[in-house]
Amino acid sequence: MQEKTEILVVGAGPGGLACATHLARNGARVVLAERRTTLGDKVCAGGITWGGLIRLVPADLIERAFPEQHIFTRRQHVTLREKNPIVATVNRQRLGQWMADEARSAGVTLLTNARVHSLSDERALIEMGQGRHTVVHFEHLVGADGSNSLIRRFVGLQSTLMGTGLNCMLPRQAERMEWHLETNRFKYGYGWIFPHAQTTSIGAYIGGSALPAVLLKQRLLSWADNQGFSIDPGAIRAGRVNFDYQGMRFGRIWLVGDAAGLASAVTGEGIYPALVSGRAVANMILDSGYAATEMTGLLHKHRRHRRLVQIAGTHARLCSLLMEALVLLFRWKLLDFRVLEMAE
Ligand SMILES: Cc1cc2nc3c(=O)[nH]c(=O)nc-3n(C[C@H](O)[C@H](O)[C@H](O)COP(=O)(O)OP(=O)(O)OC[C@H]3O[C@@H](n4cnc5c(N)ncnc54)[C@H](O)[C@@H]3O)c2cc1C
């Protein structure tokens, strides 16, 4: 089969769905190809922030919302409180389904079980399962295909700045949202407890290669045990987080979200950057003079997070000092939680 479209978007994560929906709402012809059959199934803790997405998603998608954040280091515990929820949790499958409904009603042709296999500058070969293939000819191509992006490799970019995240959804409830910046276990990464409605996300992340995934997993298991959560090692899922941003536009090929390397090096937060960059790319395709000012603040935060991880990664003692100093500044109210968020 052969098909022609103005824009082919690859990947129906938050970045691809946001981009495709915005394009279609503004009259463009869009095909969105997603290799999976189930939308939104992603290794993720599902944390979203007040400055970022909490106010942008329907209230019934929010699982739990937390005006209090508990942050621990080896020596300190600080509780941050605000009037509004600082962080809330969403179920990625429900978020994905909701965004997919929005995309379809905007007129996006959403192909599932459709894996982009190979590319040229004008067309993509898509495997549709059961030995079927489709060739899609496009004017613009948007790579929203996550941290291991085929489109990113096609434009010749390597990804050397990568984080590793491990997540386990435990079938039990927890009361508090917690961040554990324990440098002896997680170096400049952290362990988290993110309660959802009926489950709890327990996980760990580190932005860089200082802790191989196997070691991070061992440390997550022993830390979780100390916190009173017994985790079956087989229930832990791993994912990479790309923060190696090198640009979004490569002629008629565009990158958004994790494919562009826009996640936070410090926290691994990537849903908000994916949505913002998805919409920005859509606007740039629709209007070649579009200035994409929404990217300015995001890229500024992104650079700061990247630098922080690079500095913390230089020496173990410096890393420990930085984490303690950060939490001290939180305690003295000289910094607020926003420094850890990707939204301004
Ligand atoms: C353990 C862990 C915890 C995390 N927790 C959080 C959190 O709490 N909050 C937060 O904001 N972020 C979190 N993140 C990061 C967040 O999940 C990502 O940054 C976000 O999903 C990026 O969105 P995206 O649309 O760019 O890519 P993705 O969500 O990865 O979507 C990419 C899509 O492309 C599809 N695809 C890939 N290749 C192809 C192909 N060849 N053809 C067709 N389709 C393809 C994939 O199937 C996928 O659906 C976490 C990450 C990890 C690993």
Image (tube, rainbow, N blue to C red):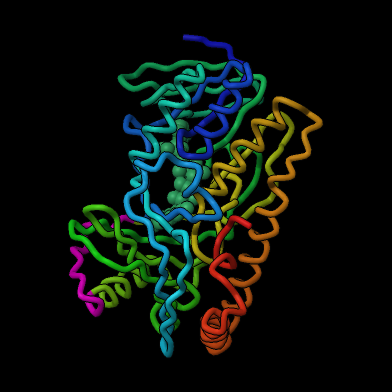
Residue at image x 49%, y 56%?
A: 49
Q: Quadrant of the C terminus?
A: bottom right
Q: Is residue 258 left or right of residue 199?
A: right
Relative to 224, is 51 on the left or the right?
right
Q: Which residues are the magenta region?
A: 225-237
Query: 34 or 79, which lies in front?
Result: 79
232 left or right of 159 in image: left
Horizontally, residue 63 falls left or right of residue 110, namely: left
Residue farthest to the front, as pictured = 83
Which residue is at the far right? 289
Pinpoint residue 208: horizontal percent, then vertical percent.
52, 66
Q: Quadrant of residue 19?
A: top right
Can you tell which quarter of the image residue 174 is in?
bottom left
Residue 148 visible in the snapshot: no
Q: Position of residue 325 (x, y in %)?
A: 57, 85
Please tell me which residue is depicted at 69% across the width and 54% down the height of the picture: 297
Looking at the image, is 153 positioned above or below residue 1? below
Q: Look at 62% across and 25% down and name the residue there.
A: 120
